[in-house]
Image (cartoon, helix red, strand yellow):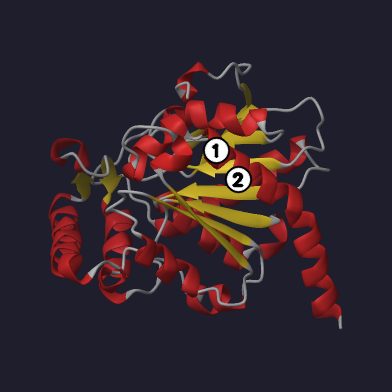
C-alpha cells in the first residue's frame, strides 16, 4: 500500500480569517467543484497543527468531500500562543467552532455539513453539536474519547488521574501548560487544561465561564455519530471513546476499529493513523453518503 503522503490533491484555498477573541483563525478548504458536496470540518487534537492532517484531508477529498481545516486557538498558525495573560478554555473553542461554521455556511449554503474531531477536537465537536444540533448533519470521532480516568483500562486509571491533575496544578502555578517542554499537548492555556483535568477527574463537562448544561444537552443529542477507535492508541482507548459517546445515548452510532490490517503495515496509535488513512477516509465517505437517509428516518420518527 502506498504511503498516504503521495495523495495527489489540489492545494487548499483560504476561505477567510475568523476573529476569536484576541486570536485570528485562518480557515482553509480543500473543495470539490460541486459546491453542494458534503463538507467535513476537521478539528485537530490538542497541540497538533492543522497541517498535520494534510494527507488525511487529501484522502477525504478523493472520497468526494470538501474538507475544511483550521487551527485551534494558540496552535499552528493561530497566535498569540498560550501565556499567563492569554486565557481560554473549552467554551472558547466551542464558540470558535461556531464562528468557523458560520464562515463555511456562507461559502457552501447548500452543502450538508459534518464535524470530524480528533482527540480534543472530538470533544469540542460533540459539545458544539449538543448545544447547536441544527448546525450539522452528524459527527465523526477519530481517536477521540473522554479523559475520565475510569474510562481507561483499570491498570492505567491511577496514572491517568495523577498525570491529568499534575498538569492542572502546573498550569495553575504558571498560568499556562508548557507542553512543548514535556512532550505532551503543546503549549496550552491554563483554563483549557483545568477544563480538561476536571473532565478527567469527574467524567463530566462543566466548562469554566459557562452555565450551560452540556451533560443534559448531550443526553438529548440525536445526530448520527461515526466513532473510530484506533489500534495501539493508549490516549483514547475504545473504553474512553465509549464513555464519551455514552453521554449521547439517543444518537445513532456506527462504530469501527481501525487496525493495521485495514491501514497497511506500520504503527498506528493516537497520531500516526493520519499517514495511512485511505481506508478510514473510505469509511467516512460511505458513512456521510448514507447519513441523509439516517437523518430522514430520524426526522420521520420524531414527527410521529
Pick the residue in front: 74 or 66. 66
Residue 283 location, quadrant: top right
Is 39 above or below relative to 132?
above
Q: Secondary structure at mark 1?
A: helix
Residue 197 location, quadrant: bottom left
The residue under label 2 is 283
Residue 166 location, quadrant: bottom left
Q: Residue at x 49, y 74 (%)?
A: 247
Q: Residue at x 34, y 45 (%)?
A: 270
Residue 209: x, y in percent? 41, 66
Left or right placement of residue 153 versus residue 270 in this view: left
Q: Residue at x 75, y 53 (%)?
A: 290
User: What is the C-alpha distance between the residues marked 1 and 2?
Assistant: 6 Å
The residue under label 1 is 279
Residue 168: x, y in percent? 20, 59
The local crowd at label 1, few if under 14, some if 14 to 19, many if 20 or more residues have their Cα within 10 Å, is some
Amino acid at each position: 500500500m502506498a504511503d498516504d503522503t503521495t495523495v495527489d490533491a489540489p492545494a487548499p484555498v483560504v476561505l477567510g480569517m475568523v476573529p476569536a477573541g484576541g486570536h485570528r483563525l485562518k480557515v482553509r478548504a480543500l473543495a470539490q467543484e460541486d459546491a453542494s458536496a458534503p463538507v467535513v470540518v476537521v478539528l485537530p487534537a490538542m497541540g497538533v497543527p492543522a497541517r498535520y492532517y494534510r494527507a488525511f484531508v487529501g484522502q477525504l477529498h478523493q472520497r468526494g468531500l470538501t474538507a475544511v481545516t483550521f487551527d485551534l486557538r494558540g496552535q499552528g498558525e493561530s497566535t498569540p500562543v498560550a501565556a499567563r495573560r492569554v486565557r481560554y478554555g473549552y467554551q472558547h473553542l466551542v464558540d470558535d467552532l461556531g464562528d468557523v461554521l458560520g464562515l463555511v455556511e456562507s461559502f457552501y449554503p447548500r452543502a450538508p455539513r459534518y464535524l470530524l474531531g480528533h482527540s480534543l477536537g472530538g470533544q469540542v465537536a460533540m459539545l458544539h453539536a449538543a448545544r447547536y444540533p441544527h448546525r450539522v448533519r452528524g459527527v465523526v470521532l477519530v481517536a477521540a474519547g473522554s479523559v475520565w480516568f475510569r474510562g481507561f483500562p483499570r491498570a492505567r486509571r491511577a496514572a491517568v488521574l495523577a498525570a491529568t491533575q499534575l498538569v492542572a496544578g502546573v498550569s495553575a502555578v504558571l498560568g499556562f501548560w508548557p507542553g512543548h517542554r514535556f512532550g505532551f499537548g503543546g503549549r496550552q492555556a491554563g483554563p483549557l487544561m483545568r477544563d480538561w483535568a476536571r473532565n478527567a477527574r469527574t467524567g463530566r463537562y462543566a466548562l469554566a465561564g459557562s452555565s450551560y448544561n452540556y451533560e443534559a444537552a448531550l443526553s438529548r443529542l440525536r445526530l448520527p455519530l461515526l466513532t473510530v477507535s484506533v489500534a495501539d492508541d493508549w490516549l483514547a482507548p475504545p473504553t474512553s471513546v465509549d464513555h464519551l459517546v455514552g453521554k449521547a445515548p439517543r444518537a445513532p452510532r456506527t462504530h469501527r476499529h481501525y487496525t493495521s490490517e485495514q491501514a497497511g503495515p506500520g504503527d498506528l496509535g493516537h497520531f500516526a493513523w493520519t499517514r495511512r488513512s485511505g481506508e478510514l477516509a473510505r469509511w467516512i465517505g460511505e458513512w456521510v453518503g448514507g447519513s441523509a437517509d439516517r437523518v430522514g428516518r430520524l426526522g420521520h420518527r420524531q414527527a410521529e
